[in-house]
Amino acid sequence: EIKPIETTNHWLVDESLYANNMSVIGLVQIDGINQETTSLEIGAFCGEEVRGSQLVQYIPELDKYLVFLTIHGEGSEEISFKLYDHSIGEELDLRSPEAITFTVNGTLGSVTSPYILNFSNMVEITASVNPSEAGVVTGAGIYAINDIATLVTTSNEGFSFKNWTVN
């Protein structure tokens, strides 16, 4: 079911709590692909506290979909990002781009050279040792698609690594 696109932001920030702000002019990507839709909203967070939120806008003169995000804060705080899709009414379960450091009156990106906000799909890598008393395997976890997952085995005394098997 496709829902009508909302015109209000999913995340709301109380701007009166912060004396300072910074700007991000960004291009939203998912797995390296430019997103050409105005249904996406970027949320900026310090921990779980929302510090900014803005819908993507289409700029006809440039034929680009950009976000003009104002982030509120005090200084030197780590800011992370989330993505909300108004066309389905859901926060997307994607790994956010690298966190940035809040800079008073700072600007990241420009209309001609936007800051890339590349969100990634995730996969879970699991691994176990058989028999379990033979040793341990490390490196399992959640990874972005196309990330390299390195698994390492350590054999207990009297055992040796033979091979990997799937399922």
Image: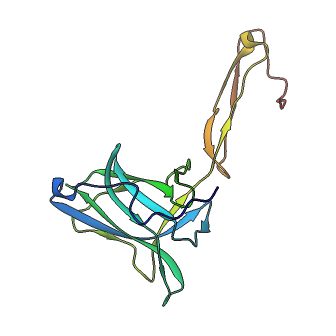
Q: State which quadrant residue 53 falls in.
A: bottom left
Asked if residue 138 is positioned above or below residue 1 in the image, the reply reads: above
Instruction: Name which residue lies at 50% across and 52% down.
Output: 96
Say if residue 97 shows up in the picture.
Answer: no
Q: Is residue 106 left or right of residue 19?
A: right
Instruction: Name which residue lies at 28% across and 51% down.
Output: 77
Q: Quadrant of the N terminus?
A: bottom right
The residue nearer to you, when weighing 8 against 38, is 8
Image location (x, y in percent) of residue 132? 73, 13
Instruction: Name which residue lies at 68% across and 52% down.
Output: 146
Image location (x, y in percent) of residue 89? 52, 54
Q: Is residue 133 left or right of residue 8?
A: right
Asked if residue 31 is positioned above or below residue 159 in the image, the reply reads: below
Q: Quadrant of the C terminus?
A: top right
Image location (x, y in percent) of residue 110? 39, 78
Image location (x, y in percent) of residue 5? 51, 65
Q: Is residue 104 left or right of residue 71?
A: left
Say if residue 109 shows up in the picture.
Answer: yes
The residue nearer to you, when weighing 155 against 119, is 119
